[in-house]
Image (tube, grey):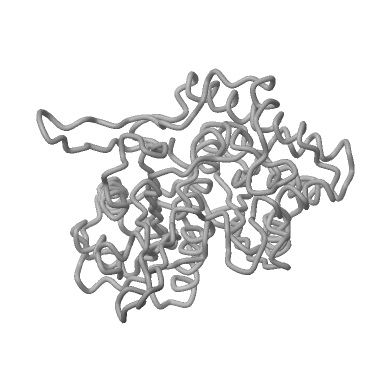
Amino acid sequence: MSDPNDLVIVSAARTPFGRFGGMLKELHSSALGTLVIKEVLSRTGLQGDAIDELYYGMCIQSEAALLYNVIGRQALIHAGLSSKTISLTIDRACCSSLTGVQLGRKSILLGEAAICMAVGAENMSNTPVVLNGHRWGTRLGKPTMVDHLNPIMYVGFKSIAADAGEVALEHDVSREMQDEWAFNSQMRYQDAKKAGKFKIGEELTSVSIPQRKGEDLLFEEDEFPKPHTTQEKLATLKTVYESPTVTAGNSPGLDAGAAALVITKRSTAESLGISPLGIILSVGSAAREPHLMAEVPAYAIQQALDRAGLSVDDLDLIEINEAFAAVPLVSTKILADNDPAKWETIKTMTNPNGGAIAIGHPVGASGARILMTAMYELRRRGGGVGAVGICGGLAQGDSVVLRVDETCDI
C-alpha cells in the first residue's frame, strides 16, 4: 500500500487545553504556538532549517495584534526555525489549522516545498477589549468598545449558536439529543483518559508556566473536562444567544491551547529516516449559506471521501469538531443520508474519545487537534481509515481523510 508520493504526517502534538481564566490565561497564544513548533520538530530529529513552509492558524486576530501581528512569523523565529522559512498566518475561523494542513499539502504536491508545518494556537482568555473612535476624537460622543472575546456573534448576522440550534431542529435534532451528545462526549473523554489515551509524549506535550514567585508550574492535562456532568444537570441549563437549543453545557468553552503537525512525502520521510505516523489520502472544503454551519462538516467530508474514492462505509472512525453538540449530530445525519440505522452506527464511531465539549475548543488549534486525535486513535487500533471535519464561522468547512497502516511504527 506504500507509495513514495504518499503525503504523510511525521509528527503531531498539542498542548493540554486550558479553560477560560485557567492556568494558561496569562500566556500569549504565540508562546503556546512556539512551544508546539519546537515539540513536533524535536520529535522528528529535524533541524530548524528543514521546514520550508509554516501555516499558522489563529482566529482572534486582536490577540495577535497585542504583539503587532505576523504572529506565525514571530512564533517560528522564537521556536528556532530558519529565518528563511516561509510562513502565513491564517484566519478561516475554527477551520484555520486544518486549512494550514491543506495548504501545506498543496505546496508539497506542487513541488514547491518538501516539508511543511501546520500550526494552530489560541488563548481566548488573553483576548483584548478593543477601543475605537478615540484616535481622531469623539467630541461629546462616547468611544466604541468591542469585546473581541466573543466569537459567537458576527455583525449583520444571527449568533452562530442561534443558527446551530435552528438548523438542528430543522433536522429533527432536539435539545435533549444535544444534551445527550454533550454528556456522552464528557464520559467518552473520561474513559479515554483512564485508558491512557491522552498522554504526554503522544498527543500531548507539557507546558511550563512561569510564576511570579517560585518554580514554574507544569501543565500536563486538559483543564476543561467536567467528569461530574449528568444529563439531568445539562437539562436545567438555559439556552444562550437566542438559540432554541444551545446551552453552555452542550457547547465547548472559550479555551486556550496550541497544536502542530509536520507533513511531507513518504519518500522524503524515508530518506531522512523518519517513520510516517499516518497518510493523508485527500482533503475537502465546503461553504454554504451562513446559517448552515452545522451542516458543512458533512459536505466537506463527503467531498474528501469522493476524492479518495471512498464512502462513509469505508471509515473506521470520524472526528467532527463539537463547536456545538448540534454540529456532529446534524453532520452525521447528513452523512447517513437520513437512514436511522446508519445514523446510529455513524454516531457510535464519531468522536470515540470525546470531543471539544469535553476537551476544549481553542478555535485556531482545533482543526489540527481533531486530525491528530483521529490519527493516534487509529494507530492504537492497529490501523484503519478515518475522516475529520470541522466547521467555521458563517458556514465554512474543511476535512481530511487519512489512513494508518498496520506497518506504521507504534
Residue 348: image quadrant is top right
Q: Whole-percent x and y of residue 17?
A: 40, 39
Image-based side of 65 in relation to 92, left or right: left
78 relative to 207, above or below: below
Q: Is residue 364 left or right of residue 322?
A: left
Q: Nearer the viewer, residue 217 or 408?
A: 217
- Residue 267 makes an appearance in the image: no
Toward the viewer: 300 or 149? 149
**Residue 375 in the image: x percent, y percent?**
52, 43
Give the total of numbered labels. Answer: 0
Residue at x-position 37% and y-position 74%: 140
* In the foreground, 324 or 160: 160
**Residue sitting at the far left:** 214
Camera-nearest residue between 308 and 249: 249
Which residue is at a point 73% across and 62% down the rendered structure image?
A: 306
Residue 224 horizontal side relative to residue 390, left or right: left
Q: Position of residue 249 (x, y in %)?
A: 60, 33
Q: Quadrant of residue 80?
A: bottom left
State the quadrant of the C terminus: top left
Residue 343 vertical position relative to residue 115 in the rendered view, above or below? above
Can residue 71 be seen by looking at this rendering? yes
What's the residue at 48%, 69% (across, down)? 103
Vertical order, 318 against 33 (above or below): above
